[in-house]
């Protein structure tokens, strides 16, 4: 019998998202990732639309973006209830009226909404953290069920293949589980941990090379967003590898051919210098050796009923 990690995963992400929700630079990046242009939809398409973020998390970042794009009937859910106060606080802090949003506790495996309830359904980085491929398929089926004919289903699954996902990250995750000191470091990592190392480097240059180096600008690139990214990669107990062909098969005959989405993520931290490589992965065989498929993000229109 497959072990159920769902509530453990939700608790881990609640801790991560709570940090992000309090960090305006990180929130600005996340909210700015979503737009009509990115989704390939006309300007003002979301006006007056009913929308759902399945697995909205404690930041409610997608709900904030959808509100800014004009959606008025806004819904989101996630497991348990601890995330709700943090999500509502995040919404309020970003000027989203709480009477425009409905948030509840639910599972993507059993969504408590009627068939064809929403014009737009989002599920961002949830399905790959379910307990098995079978659960991922069941969750996708639920997302498809609540999408209206003529509406859109947007899903983000993560990365399939590549040296990082197949070898490097699994080794680090195994070390995280096996080494208490490393686990404690990751669980509590903060920018000042890296800032101290920058100071150590500058002191080393001065002492051993007689070079005075101003590395203060580097500290600004070692931020909370970067720390949470490290936690995101290492802490989650399940990270399914779901290939592109499988995702396209999930959309199946009920949807038009899904469009794979790609965006250039503008970052303020040191990952900025990798952003061009992430963006070019789909077209570069050398990068594919490292990054595999790149992030698998898709949108498709649900076909109208006959």
Image (tube, helix red, strand yellow):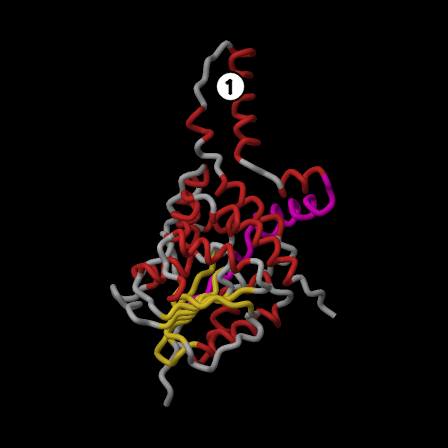
Q: Is residue 155 left or right of residue 181?
A: left
Q: Determine whether 253 is above or below 174 in the image.
A: below
Residue 245, position as x, y percentages in the image? 50, 68
**Residue where numbered disc 1 is placed:** 202
In magenta stretch: residue 160: yes
Q: Main secondary structure of the magenta part?
A: helix
Q: Is residue 182 left or right of residue 297?
A: right
Q: Is residue 195 left or right of residue 121?
A: right
In the orientation shown, which residue stands out farthest toward the left?
43
Of 252 and 79, nearer the camera is 79
Indicate the position of residue 216 as horizontal and vertical percent values: 44, 24
Task: Indicate the quadrant where residue 64 lies.
Answer: bottom left
Q: Quadrant of the C terminus?
A: bottom left
Q: 283 and 47: which one is in front?
A: 47
**Nearest the camera: 128 or 250?**
128
Point 47% across, 81% down: residue: 114
Q: Which residues are magenta?
A: 154-180
Residue ranking furthest to the bottom: 306
């Amino acid at each position: 019998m497959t072990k159920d990690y769902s509530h453990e995963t939700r608790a881990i992400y609640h801790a991560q998202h709570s940090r992000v929700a309090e960090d305006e630079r990180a929130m600005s990046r996340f909210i700015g990732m979503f737009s009509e242009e990115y989704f390939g939809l006309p300007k003002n398409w979301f006006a007056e639309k009913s929308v759902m973020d399945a697995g909205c998390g404690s930041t409610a970042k997608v709900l904030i973006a959808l509100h800014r794009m004009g959606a008025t009937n806004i819904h989101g859910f996630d497991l348990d209830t601890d995330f709700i106060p943090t999500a509502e606080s995040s919404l309020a802090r970003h000027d989203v009226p709480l009477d425009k949003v409905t948030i509840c506790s639910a599972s993507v495996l059993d969504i408590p909404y009627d068939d064809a309830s929403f014009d737009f359904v989002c599920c961002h980085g949830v399905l790959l953290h379910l307990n098995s491929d079978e659960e991922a398929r069941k969750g996708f089926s639920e997302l498809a069920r609540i999408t209206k004919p003529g509406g859109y289903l947007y899903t983000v699954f993560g990365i399939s293949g590549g040296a990082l996902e197949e070898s490097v990250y699994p080794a680090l995750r195994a070390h995280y589980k096996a080494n208490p000191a490393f686990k404690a470091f990751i669980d509590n990592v903060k920018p000042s941990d890296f800032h101290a190392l920058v100071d150590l480097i500058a002191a080393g240059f001065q002492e051993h090379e007689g070079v005075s180096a101003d590395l203060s600008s580097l500290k600004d690139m070692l931020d909370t967003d970067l720390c949470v990214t490290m936690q995101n990669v290492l802490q989650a107990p399940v990270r399914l590898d779901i290939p592109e062909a499988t995702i396209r098969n999930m959309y199946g005959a009920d949807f038009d051919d899904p469009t794979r989405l790609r965006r250039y993520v503008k970052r303020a931290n040191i990952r900025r210098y990798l952003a061009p490589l992430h963006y070019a992965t789909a077209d570069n065989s050398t990068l594919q050796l490292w990054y595999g498929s790149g992030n698998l993000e898709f949108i498709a229109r649900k076909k109208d009923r006959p």
